[in-house]
Image (cartoon, rainbow, N blue to C red):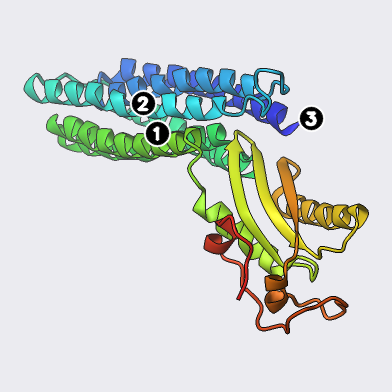
Amino acid sequence: MSIATENFSFQKKLTIVTILLFFLKIVAWAFTHSVAVLTDALEYTINVIAGLVSLYSLYLSAQPKDNNHPYGHGKAEFVSAAVEGILMTTSCFLIIYEAVDNLLHPHTFHKLDIGIYIVAFTAGINYLVGYYAIKKGHKNNALTLVATGKHMQSDTYGTMAIIGGLILLYFTHLSWIDSVISLIFAVVIFVSGYKILRSSIAGIMDEADEELLKGVVKYLNEHRRVNWMDIHNLRIIKYGSILHMDCHVTIPWYFNIHQGHDEVKALEDMVRLNFGEQVELFVHTDGCLPISCGICTKADCTVRQHDFVRKIEWTVENVSTNSKHSV
């Protein structure tokens, strides 16, 4: 099973769970008539809608490359995450409206104890499923699963606040507590939705992933071969669960095609070993120049024109430039 197909299968299970939890939240509201519980249920409709959108986006991203999409369909995952972020942030206005309306026109509550038990159960399941979604998303480099998992966990934090408020409401009968909890919940959802929206836009716009770049450069520094004088013009683009990496590698100018291929193959194998099989690596080889002698550590070079001066430590800054390294 491919990574994309595995992500799609996992998202199907997530969607089924969210639908079941949504109906349980509706049952809890029917018992309690609490606006905070209603807010929780209304917000969870976003999970259901987003889950269906995510399911479709993962279905698209699992499709093979074609003439119209030579890099695959992975960008659909970023669009899906953007939709989820937008739904989360806009839902805050509905929650705020319901909370203010409850302050002005307090509702009558019923069977809060039953509602607390049901909501607490949904919170526990929600958090665990969200945890596994984030774990699976990071493992398979799937932003959609990470976004869904974070959304579910942010729901859990809000739901826990609602549970605490319901317990307080149960003992004090102060109806304004219900509205205050809903307003706090709205802020939590807005912040989480903004973060998801921000990361999805970064993916759509091919924004550089600084943490990923740092990890790649650090790994290459630690495992560099003597025949790699430098690596430059390094670029990483995310297409859903697939990473496309381009770079230029400077090798001895007198290497034949087979020797150059061996160096490229070694680099590809090294990257895939550490970052997974979902990496597409395109390497352009450059022959070394006399200026390369000062940074070349190759001791058995028979055509060296200048003495070795110092080893260049690779950084995100110097491997991202489009020029060969020199002292």
N-term mark: 1 or 3: 3
Q: Quadrant of the N terminus?
A: top right
Name the secondary structure under disc 2. Answer: helix
Asked whether 235 or 61 is in front, the reply is 235
Asked whether 36 or 81 is in front, the reply is 81
N-term mark: 1 or 2: 2
- Residue 197, numbered circle: 1
Q: In the image, 178: left or right of 244?
A: left
Q: Which amino acid does label 2 sit on?
A: Ile
Name the secondary structure under disc 1. Answer: helix
Q: What residue type is labelled 1?
A: Leu
Residue occupying the point 21% across, 33% down:
183
Disc 2 target residue: 86
**Which class describes the residues within 10 Å of circle 3: few (<14), some (14-19), or many (20+)?**
few
Q: Quadrant of the C terminus?
A: bottom right
Q: What residue type is labelled 3?
A: Met
146 vs 298: above or below: above
The Cα–Cα distance between marks 1 and 2, rounded to whole angstroms, is 7 Å
Q: Residue 46's quadrant in the figure? A: top left
Disc 3 target residue: 1
- Residue 228, numbered circle: none
The answer to whether residue 180 is seen in the rendering is yes
The answer to whether residue 114 is seen in the rendering is no
Q: Do the residues labelled 1 and 3 touch (CB within 8 Å)?
A: no
Horizontal and vertical percent position of residue 298? 81, 76
Horizontal and vertical percent position of residue 219? 67, 63
Q: Do the residues labelled 1 and 2 touch (CB within 8 Å)?
A: yes
